[in-house]
Image (cartoon, rainbow, N blue to C red):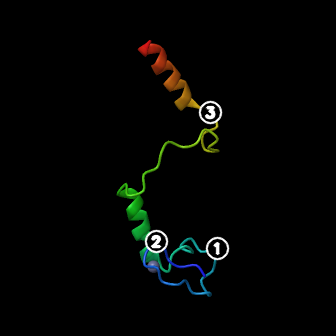
Amino acid sequence: MASCPICKKTLRASNPPTAPQSRFCSERCRLIDLGNWLDGRYVVTRPAPSDPTNPDGEPDEQELLALLRDLQ
Ligand SMILES: [Zn+2]
């Protein structure tokens, strides 16, 4: 059975799975998790090149190649 990642409380079966806070037992725990992200507790590396929000391809790789050229 799923449990809240913040307080480890077992999620109630009546909790609708489509609710935005479905991973959490309550709105409070959801906000705590959001705060953890904002604090940088979860370090996120640069998005994958196949990121659908980045349809322009792989700008990071282009920047890296340009940087390597400058160094040589
Ligand atoms: Zn909780």
Q: In the picture, which quadrant includes the C terminus?
A: top left
Measured from the top left, where is residue 46 in percent x and y? Answer: 50, 42
Provide the secondary structure element on which disc 1 rests. Answer: loop
Residue at the spot 61% in from the left edge and 82% down from the top edge:
1
User: Which is more N-terminal, label 1 or label 3?
Assistant: 1
Query: How far, Cα to Cα, is label 3 from label 1?
Result: 32 Å
Please say if 24 is above or below 45.
Answer: below
x and y percentages locating residue 37 in the rendered image: 41, 59
Amino acid on which the number 1 mark rests in the picture: Thr
In this view, the residue farthest toward the left is 39
Image check: 63 left or right of 40? Answer: right
Q: How many marks?
A: 3
**Residue reaching furthest to the front:** 72
* Residue located beneath label 3 in the image: 56
Q: Nearer the viewer, residue 44 or 57?
A: 44
Task: Classify 10 Å Cα crowding around label 1: few (below 14), some (14-19), many (20 and above).
Answer: few
For this orientation, the residue located farthest to the top is 72
Closer-to-camera residue (28/72): 72
Give the mark nearest the N terminus, 2 or 1. 1
Marked residue nearer the N-terminal end (3 or 2): 2
**Residue that numbered label 2 is attached to:** 30
Circle 2: residue type? Arg
The numbered mark at residue 18 is 1
Q: Is residue 52 above or below residue 28?
A: above
In percent of width and height, residue 61 lies at 55, 28
Q: Position of residue 65 (x, y in %)?
A: 52, 21
Instruction: Compute the Cα span from label 3 to label 2.
Output: 32 Å
Residue drawn at the location 58% of the way across and 78% of the way down:
2
Label 2 SS? helix
Identify the residue at horizontal 50%, vertical 77% (top origin): 4
